[in-house]
Amino acid sequence: MFGLMFAARPERVLSELARVTRSGGQVALANWTRGGFVGRMLAMHVARVPPPPGVPSPLLWGDPEKVRQRFDAASGRHHGERTLTFRYPYTPAGIGELFRSSYGPTVRTFEAIDEDARASLAADLTSHWTKHQRPSAETTEVDAEYLEVVATRR
């Protein structure tokens, strides 16, 4: 879940999925969407550190049309938007720190930017978590949209 989408070469991912999935077997994926909570958070990262040339956005895995194109050889394919609720016993600022120390894309972004940009991104992450916080929650709770994909190999 949410890992394969960060591979730099989607064509190799698809080739490997086809190689390890027998005929009639299924592949199930969960991919963040561009317009969802995590997609907007990742946009903050890319605004500060663009991806290397030629590396497609991982958020294309959350685009139903792109997924249809990528899995054109699969039958029985279906997808649908789902919601995952993040629940953390931290403040939004504490979650920003947690992501800064342990969430790969955030770790890499902080490593690549200068001190002023780090302060700016930290403030933006806190603001993002605060803005999307469920008002009635006692701890931080945020809904994040993702695309569920299930494809059956022919």
Image (cartoon, helix red, strand yellow):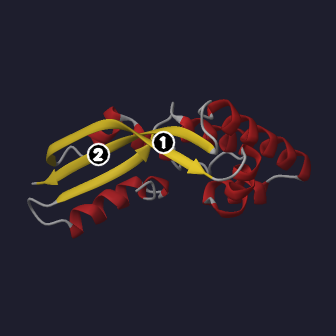
- Residue 35 in the image: above or below residue 16: above
Q: Residue at x 15, y 52 (%)?
A: 152
Q: Residue at x 66, y 42 (%)?
A: 46
Q: Nearer the viewer, residue 133 or 5?
A: 133
State which mark lies toward you, 2 or 1: 2
Name the image quarter holding the C terminus.
Answer: bottom left
Label 2 residue SS: strand
Question: Horizontally, is 119 left or right of 132 in the view?
Answer: right
Q: Tell me the kind of residue under disc 2.
A: Val
Q: Around disc 1, counting alpha carbons within 10 Å, would you say few (fewer than 14), some (14 to 19), or many (20 or more)? A: many
Residue under label 1? 59
- Residue projecting furthest to the bottom: 20
Q: Tell me the kind of residue under disc 1.
A: Leu
Q: Quadrant of residue 9?
A: bottom left
Question: Horizontally, is 93 left or right of 139 in the view?
Answer: right
Q: Quadrant of residue 142?
A: top right
Residue under label 2? 149
**Residue 112 rendering spot, x and y as whole percentages:** 77, 56
**Residue 59 rendering spot, x and y as whole percentages:** 48, 42
Question: Horizontally, is 21 left or right of 112 in the view?
Answer: left
